[in-house]
Image: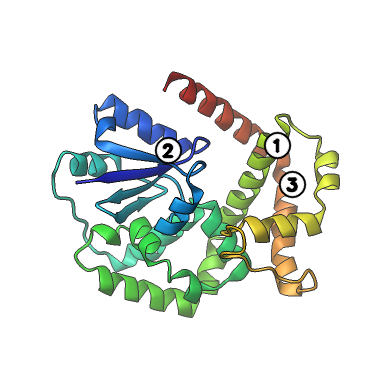
Amino acid sequence: MEVEIFTHKNCTECNLLIEYLESRGLLGKVKLVDTELYPFLALERGVISTPSVFVDGKLVYAGKVDLYELEEILNGNQVSREFNREELIKKFMEGVVDSFAATAWLYVNRDFDSFMSQRDFVLAVTGLALSDKVDEGYQFLRDVLVKDGEKVLNEWEPMMLKNISSNFVREIYWLYERKLPKESLFSKYPLEVFAHWLMVRGGAVGRVGLRIHPLSSVQTMTRIAKVYSYLQENYDSIWDRVEKEQRKLKEMRAVQ
């Protein structure tokens, strides 16, 4: 059995997973793949969020990993999940808002018909990858989201705004290595520049996955302006949270 884990050094969940596996004496049973060093391999394998765990080539976890289940798998035990229709949409959207790429792409493009073609990701975040009713569960979820996707996105909008804003601030932290005054930040990144960042960063690698909406698109810019306003209103608290997170990450990497 081959278990591969696609990671990134700035991914908190990745570092926690590595730390856990090491503490359980299981790190030697997995192959770690750094998505910063091998981005095109990650793209080829359909990695949307990290950590992504593949078992014998099959994507089993994306973003959130059930540590107990993974330990069972690594110890050679069979793991399966019950199929529960009532929880599928919730699990799917939890997986989406755990991934910046998925969140940004869906928030801007509102295209579930296209997004659901990422079948392996959908199965991984919902737990269907470990179910014996994969096709039934996937088809049910696809039908609901293609029909009522806008309603679902509206219900999950607060979490999507938080995800996008946090990732923007996180990248500002990496770029400048210090907190920019609020006025300076929004002077450097007016709404049009922020819109460009969101469309380009939202699930695109080069032109793969890239959808550029004209700045004249009222619907698109209204949605993006909502994120921008959220970011402006919550910048200080988001920065504090990101700064604490990044300091903890540095401490974790220092002891690995």
Vertical comparison of 50 with 45: above or below: above
Q: Residue at x 81, y 39 (%)?
A: 182
Residue 14, labelled with which disc?
A: 2
Q: Which residue is mark 1?
A: 175
Residue 88 position, x and y percent, is 35, 64
**Real-space Cα distance between discs 3 and 2?**
30 Å
Screen quadrant of the C terminus: top left
Asked if residue 245 is positioned above or below residue 214 in the image, the reply reads above
Are the residues flagged by discs 3 and 2 in contact, CB closer than 8 Å? Answer: no
Q: Amino acid at mark 1?
A: Leu
Pointer 2 or 1: first along the chain: 2
Q: Quadrant of residue 223?
A: bottom right
Residue 37's disc is none
Q: Compare residues 22 and 13 and report the one nearer the observer.
A: 22
Distance of label 1 from label 3 (alpha carbons): 21 Å
Considering only order in the chain, which callout, 3 or 1, is on the residue closer to the N terminus? 1
Circle 2 crowding by C-alpha within 10 Å: few under 14, some 14–19, many from 20: many
Instruction: Residue at 16% x, 38% y: name it.
Output: 75
Question: At 50% across and 68% down in the image, what residue appears?
Answer: 152
The answer to whether one can see residue 131 in this image is yes
